[in-house]
Image: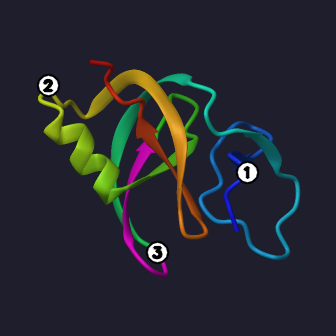
Amino acid sequence: MAWDRKAPFTKDGALVSYVGPAQSEIEWRNADDPMEMTLAFAGFERGRSAAHAIWKDAQDRRFVMFLTDLQELIMRGDPVSVVQSNRWIVTKKGQDFGIKLIPATK
């Protein structure tokens, strides 16, 4: 089944990385809408199926990043900092959601 390009967020604006069957109070937003955010790297975490990078904003909202997207951020050649002020979009792998840097335009 194709992804409808909608992403789950909590009412306070944090990205929900996995939507379980009993999950409620989710706002579905367009995954392609850019989000201008300053995020601080908060470490790594293991989920059920993979490891993720965790980023947090000034309101302590959590944003998961797949390691392949973290690798892409590092390999861009831009200076990589623990704090990133950038434009982000939501991506999906399997049943999980995460953020990624908007690809650089050539």
Task: Indicate left or right for 60 with 77 as reference.
Answer: right
In this rendering, the answer to whether 92 lies above or below 95 is: above
Where in the figure is residue 85, as x and y percent of width and height?
38, 20
Range covered by the magenta-colored residues: 47-55
Where in the figure is residue 69, as x and y percent of width and height?
33, 49
Mark 2 nearby-residue class (10 Å; few <14, some 14–19, many ≥20): few
Q: Is residue 30 magenta?
A: no
Mark 1 nearby-residue class (10 Å; few <14, some 14–19, many ≥20): few
Q: Residue at x 58, y 31 (%)?
A: 59
N-terminal of the pair, mark 3 or mark 2, is 3
The residue type indicated by label 1 comes to: Asp
Q: CA distance from mark 3 to mark 2?
A: 28 Å
N-terminal of the pair, mark 1 or mark 3, is 1
Quadrant of residue 18 within the rendered picture: bottom right
Quadrant of residue 52 within the rendered picture: bottom left
Residue that mark 1 sits on: 4
The residue type indicated by label 3 comes to: Gly
The residue type indicated by label 2 comes to: Pro
Residue 79 got which mark? 2
Where in the figure is residue 67, as x and y percent of width and height?
31, 58
Q: Residue at x 74, y 37 (%)?
A: 12
Secondary element under disc 2, as helix, strand or loop, is loop
Q: Residue at x 31, y 29 (%)?
A: 83
Secondary element under disc 1, as helix, strand or loop, is loop
N-terminal of the pair, mark 2 or mark 1, is 1
Residue that mark 3 sits on: 47
Q: Residue furthest bottom?
A: 48
Task: Indicate left or right for 17 with 27 as reference.
Answer: left
Q: CA distance from mark 1 to mark 3?
A: 24 Å
